[in-house]
Image: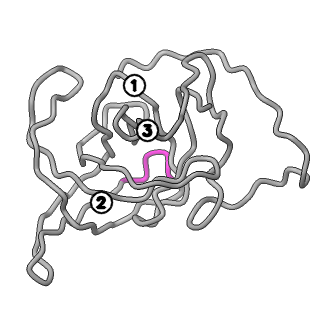
Amino acid sequence: MIGWREKIALPDLGLPLIHAKIDTGARTSALHATRIRPFERDGESWVRFHIPHAGLTRAADCEARLVDRREIRNTSGIGEERHVIATALLIGGRRWTIEISLADRAGMAMPLILGRTAIRRHRVLVDAGRSFLAGPPAGRGGAEKTKRAAGKPRAAKTQTMERDDE
């Protein structure tokens, strides 16, 4: 079970900890990126982009193989062509590959929207009234482990649901 907000990692992009909004109403995941520049490497399409500091410990410049360019509707319902990459997602102690579109999300509360196709078929339930249920991303490429005593269960926290109009 995960909450409507989670701390995740995108280790292939060098992002060990990032806050994500889990949005089952959104089909596609979207990562806040600026300075998006496609380029060719060894005959393949790649994209170079900048992840601003927003919610991260530091800004990051990233490169990833371009999977697709597709029209995706933004939060206002207007279609826009976006670059789409595939990368590893680390949430709690679980890891799998997801597709993420790169978009300017500067006006949004969280730098990453995790859409329903990213969590479909991974046996994940979303508790829309709670946050940070998965714990920090653990495993290869995730944030450092917490100082919780080994073997001691994590106490579930009930969070007051904050509204962010995304």
Q: Going by the image, does 50 lie left or right of 35?
A: right
* Position of residue 135 in the picture relative to residue 99 (left or right): right
Task: Based on the picture, tell me whether residue 89 belongs to the magenta stretch.
Answer: no
At mark 3, the secondary structure is loop
Contact? badges 3 and 2 (CB < 8 Å): no
Residue at image point 8% right, 80% down: 43
Q: For mark 2, what is the residue?
A: 50
Give the residue number, with chain letter if any, for mark 1. Answer: 24
Q: Is residue 55 magenta?
A: yes
- Badge nearest the viewer, 3 or 2: 3
Secondary structure at numbered mark 1: loop
When the figure is inspected, residue 110 is found, relative to residue 48, above or below; the finding is above
Decide which of tag 2 and tag 1 comes sooner along the chain.
Answer: 1
Q: CA distance from mark 3 to mark 2?
A: 30 Å
Instruction: Please provide percent x and percent y for residue 161.
Output: 58, 15
Q: Which residues are magenta?
A: 52-56
Please rate how many residues cluster around mark 3, counting C-alpha atoms within 10 Å: few if below 14, some from 14 to 19, many from 20.
few
Percent across and percent down for residue 45 are 12, 69
